[in-house]
Amino acid sequence: MTPVELSRTVVHAVRRAVDAGELTVDVPSRVVVAPPGPGGCADYATNVALQLARPAGQPPLRVAEVLRGYLSDAVGVVDVEITGPGFLNISLDRAAVSAGLDDLVRQILREGLRYGHTDALAGRVFELRVPYEVRAEVLADALGRIVGAQGGRVEVDHREPVNLRPVPAPEDPTPLGLDAACWALLHPAPHDRPRITAEHLVQREGNPLFRVRYAHARTRALRRNAVALRFTAGDDAHFAGDDADVHSAAAGHLALPTLLADYPRVLTTVASLPHTDGAGAPSRLTRHLLDLADAALPFFSTVLPRGDEKPSAAHRARLALAEAVGTVLAGGLTLLGIDAPDHL
């Protein structure tokens, strides 16, 4: 079960509660599920009960109790626990997690850099009127690519009244080079002042751009090293099955499927709302790529065989997951106008 599928399961539980007359609310179109935060437990958590409490006219804990009853008998769910003011913590059947991740990875590898691209905005045109200022130009350029990935189109003009006016760059970012300059201007929210410093060029962990590009380069290095060891992420690279190591590869890094599955939604959100309020800012995409890179880097050490180990289905599954991460990182960087090098 992927996070997207679990989100649908939670929505279905809300709908069943509404149909049964236990809740009187509008059924949400989607629900956010994510790895639990401090104080949480299980595989995923959702705050849907807190969101529905006010429109339902009931305390969050009561709403959570109602939804727990409908979630507990859902396919793939083995336990639901309520923590805090009404967070639902959901434990999944490991086989369900594995099979869902298998489908997600295959989809990403099949669609390649077009994963997350849709025609949701087909026929829509967004007019961005920007000042003659480098940050506004770079922001509009990135939005043009992201909106285009959803089937829409952006028309950029410099006439008044301006409807996209980010905080200007304090100095010329050109000396940073194209990639670092784009990141420096896009990573902060439009209302935040960008920092134009040589920090964006330093190859170390403190540089967010380096971490994202390094994670991508690591996926390419893992592929090259796997080929040298005479194995690839072939047709038997799956997470389903009885092998405990395969299940560990799938379930031990639950942030990865969450972030991979959420990437299309991030693109849609940015593309649908290219406004100055920051709701549709490319900074949402840069943060998502950074979260994905930070979640993936510890996982990469588990991909290749160690010592006298022979490549197995578990290694091929991990390699497939690593390649899916690299695909999403490359796709996101490309939409931002930033190169995704195979070597760093």
Image (spheres, grey):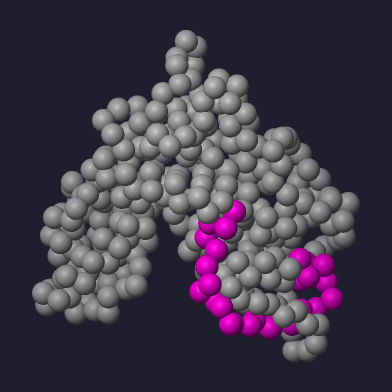
Quadrant position of residue 24: bottom left
> What is the number of callouts on the image?
0
Q: Magenta stretch: give its range.
A: 113-138
- Residue 331 part of the magenta segment: no
Quadrant position of residue 220: top right
Query: From what the image shows, is residue 204 above or below residue 184?
Result: above
The picture places residue 322, in percent across and down from the top left corner, at: 52, 38
Q: Determine the residue positioned at 54% across, 40% down.
A: 323
The picture places residue 106, in percent across and down from the top left corner, at: 44, 47
Q: Determine the residue positioned at 63% across, 49% down.
A: 330
Q: Is residue 25 left or right of residue 315?
A: left
Q: Is residue 214 left or right of residue 43?
A: right
Q: Which residue is the extreme one toward the top?
A: 308
Q: Determine the residue positioned at 44% across, 27% down.
A: 315
Residue closer to the observer: 201 or 95? 95
Q: Is residue 188 left or right of residue 327?
A: right
Query: From what the image shows, is residue 186 above or below residue 156?
Result: above
- Residue 134 part of the magenta segment: yes
Q: Determine the residue positioned at 83% across, 72% down.
A: 133
The picture places residue 62, in percent across and down from the top left corner, at: 16, 66
The picture places residue 194, in percent across and down from the top left corner, at: 74, 60
Residue closer to the observer: 22 or 85? 22
